[in-house]
Amino acid sequence: MGVAFILSSAVLPAAFAAEPPPNLARLVAEREAAAQEARAQYTYRQHIVIEEGGPRAGQYRETRDIIFSPSGERTEQLLRPATNTLKRLLLTPEDFADIRDIQPLLITPELLPRYIVRFKGDEDVDGRDCWVLELTPRQLFHGFRMFDGLVWIDKESLAIVRTYGRAVPELRTRTNENLFPRFTTLREPVDGGHWFPALTIADDLLEFRTGPIRMKLTIRYSDYKRFGAESSITFETPPQ
């Protein structure tokens, strides 16, 4: 079980695809750094739903706004207390770190040397001609979250428009298991410029020693608004 249905067509073998720029990874990382800097100037809403399968299925749900304080400092505002009825899944600091840093995935020049990058071909993504790169961590460190998977890059803008993979490393000890689902993140252009995360979905079977647990994850990003010195950002409270 997984999110393979998102991959609407097979990635072409590199041997049959047009050759990308030799410095494609570096160009993409530089484009990502610009996107990261731009996204830091936007407010937005993030709605998270985590569900578990099984006869005693539960759910975690929260909605928060990423905003700026009156003094201009970036901050987060939880719209109401998160609800958590999960019975078998235990959310960990790594899960929330992945939601913050891995699912939206920004591969900047500083992070690029930590990855082995392989060209996998090209593919059409919703009418856009894209390069496909595979990112594999060179080395895994405890406490440092990384991405392992594929990224689709719009050939015209060099923006990442889709990612598919998982956060690593998984954490297994004699007494503890911390596993993470495969996910797909889709991006959309904001203000006709940078591509920001719009939707992350996962539907995966986590193979714990005590038995498999199906986990579903949905993260929706909405209401991107550029913040300025004269801006006043308000959001409507979502219905209960």
Image (spheres, grey):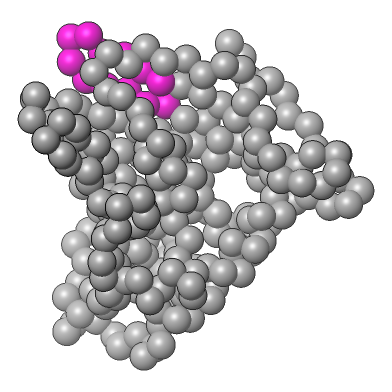
Task: Tell me: residue 28, above or below residue 231.
Answer: below
Picture quadrant where residue 120 is located:
bottom left
Quarter of the image with the C terminus is top right
Task: Tell me: residue 140, above or below residue 200.
Answer: below
Between residue 19 and residue 139, name the one nearer to us: 139
State the residue at coordinates (69%, 40%): 75
Q: From the viewer's perspective, tell me whether residue 235 is left or right of residue 100.
A: right
Confirm whether residue 146 shows in the render.
yes
Residue 97 in magenta? Answer: no
Picture quadrant where residue 45 is located:
top right
Between residue 35 and residue 159, name the one nearer to us: 35
Q: From the viewer's perspective, tell me whether residue 189 is left or right of residue 88.
A: right
Given the current orientation, which residue lies at the most extreme front position?
Answer: 174
Confirm whether residue 6 shows in the render.
no
State the residue at coordinates (21%, 66%): 11
Q: Which x, y percent locates residue 61?
A: 46, 21
Task: Tell me: residue 72, above or below residue 233.
Answer: below
State the residue at coordinates (23%, 38%): 179
Between residue 135 and residue 22, name the one nearer to us: 135
Q: From the viewer's perspective, tell me whether residue 192 is left or right of residue 27.
A: right
Picture quadrant where residue 164 is located:
bottom left
Between residue 41 and residue 157, name the one nearer to us: 41
Please provide the residue range marked out in magenta. 49-60
The total of numbered circles placed on residues is: 0
Q: Which x, y percent locates residue 115?
A: 32, 71
Quarter of the image with the N terminus is top left
Q: Which x, y percent locates residue 153?
A: 41, 69
State the residue at coordinates (26%, 70%): 138
Given the current orientation, which residue lies at the most extreme bottom position?
Answer: 22
